[in-house]
Image: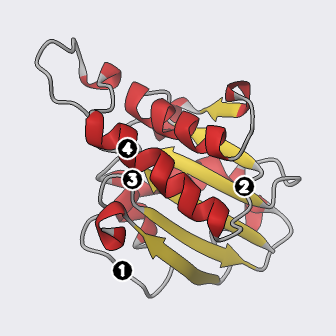
Amino acid sequence: MKSLIIVRHAKSSWDLSTPNDFDRPLNDRGKKDAPAAAKRLVKKNVEIDAFISSPAKRARKTAKHFIKEYNRGKDEIILVAELYQAHAASFYDVIRNLDDSYNNVAIFSHNPGVTDFVNTLTEVHIDNMPTCGIFAVKCDIDRWADFKDAAKQFWFFDYPKLNE
């Protein structure tokens, strides 16, 4: 059994002094929401073996907040360039190449790709993945290469305003 936890990066800054989209940092709300979301997962006993992130600053920082709550080292975040401005198909490509020793993987990325991707997974569809939203599925497979065509079970959907 494998589980996939898809996380949209936390709320980011639109400060005009940031030189480009790739380098946009988290804003104050994002810096609060990311550790709170990670704490909720820890409290629910959601295991994560691998933290895979877009290399964009806001996704990396969100992943760092999660990895800290899981008492893991920052060097364990695996940066995957294809997750920046990813389309739904890109997520499947990344997942297909995951190490099969990982059973519980968290992927940190961006909209609109995140919303498009999670809406391909199960019968549960969402209009828009909110910032720091988490959509999780389980899949009865042994190899990540089999994920795309395998039946997936909706596990949970969580986001900051759900918990206010």
Q: CA distance from mark 4 to mark 1?
A: 27 Å
Label 2 crowd bin: few (<14), some (14–19), many (20+), radius 10 Å = some
Q: Quadrant of residue 46?
A: bottom right
Kindly identify which residue carries mark 3: 132
Which quarter of the rendered picture does the N terminus lie within?
bottom right
Identify the secondary structure beneath mark 2.
Answer: loop
Identify the secondary structure beneath mark 4.
Answer: helix
Label 3 crowd bin: few (<14), some (14–19), many (20+), radius 10 Å = many
Residue at (28%, 66%) from the top-left corner? 161
Question: Which of label 4 and label 3 is nearer to you?
Answer: 4
Name the spot of residue 135 as percent of width and height, x first: 48, 68
Residue at (64%, 71%) from the top-left corner? 44
Q: Residue type at mark 1?
A: His
Identify the mark nearer the N-term, 3 or 1.
1
Kindly identify which residue carries mark 4: 32
Name the spot of residue 164 as percent of width and height, x first: 30, 68
Is residue 145 positioned above or below 76 on the image? Answer: below
Kindly identify which residue carries mark 2: 48
